[in-house]
Amino acid sequence: MMAQLDRSHTDDQYLERLRTFELPATRWLLIGLVGAVIAAWIGWSAFETNHYRAAIPPEIGLAFGLATTDSDSSLWTARLPIPPKACGGAIFGLDSATAAAIRAQGPAFFKAATRGRGYRGPPGDGGYKWQPTPLPDGWISWRLQGMWYGLSCMRLRPDYAQSISAAAAGPNAFYTTGPSTMLLVIPDQRLVVFTYTH
């Protein structure tokens, strides 16, 4: 009977500790630090997604979520007096309704998609001029494993980069170029790829 009382007393103490969930201050500090790092990463990713999203025309529906972004620049190169040339980009998901509309309409879908969401310039400067893939000769380089310069700077998984390159080299995708930029829409993979070189 004494053993049973001791066990119930121990169970009560265990339940009380669970209710109050006491952790040492160092663990709370560590949890707070990890939470701050995660929040900073999500905030920066959201900022980058919003920045690149401005280049995508509103007619091109994007799936909800953060873009895959990367570049060859770093905090170290940004602090140099004359920063070196940079390249990189962002990859967004294409929503299913837009992918279906592009498959159904083909090049006609892009007639109204001439300005990025964040465009604030005068209306008469031409805007995006869309063309069907494949990309022209000289865009894709064997030295860059079949990629173009902006895409190669994004440090993507090789299989992911190869699937984007293959779509750009084949039919059924659409692209437009601007000064040092390229925008590629791949409805079959439901991807929108924006790359730049500076």
Image: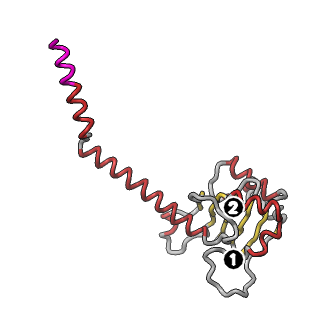
**At x 21% / y 19%, what residue is drawn?**
7
Magenta span has 59? Answer: no
- Residue 58 appears at what percent x and percent y? 66, 71
- Residue 44 appears at what percent x and percent y? 48, 62
Magenta span has 8? Answer: yes
In this rendering, does residue 143 appear at all? no
Residue 171: quadrant of the picture: bottom right
- Residue 14 appears at what percent x and percent y? 24, 30
Q: Quadrant of the C terminus?
A: bottom right
**At x 64% / y 85%, what residue is drawn?**
121
Residue under label 2: 192
In this rendering, does residue 170 appear at all? yes
Find the residue positioned furthest to the top. 1
Label count reads 2
- Residue 149 appears at what percent x and percent y? 70, 63
Q: Secondary structure at mark 2?
A: strand
Find the residue positioned furthest to the left. 2
Amino acid found under the numbered disc labelled 1: Arg
Residue under label 1: 115
Q: Which SS type dominates the magenta stretch?
A: helix
Residue 68: quadrant of the picture: bottom right
Which stretch appears magenta? 1-10
Relative height, residue 91 to residue 181 (above, below): above
**At x 64% / y 62%, what residue is drawn?**
62
Crowd band around label 1 with a 10 angstrom C-alpha radius: few (<14), some (14–19), many (20+): many
5 horizontally vs 152: left or right: left
Q: Quadrant of the N terminus?
A: top left
The numbered dot on residue 171 is: none
Q: Secondary structure at mark 1?
A: loop
**At x 66% / y 74%, what residue is drawn?**
116
Q: Are marks 2 and 1 in contact (CB under 8 Å)?
A: no
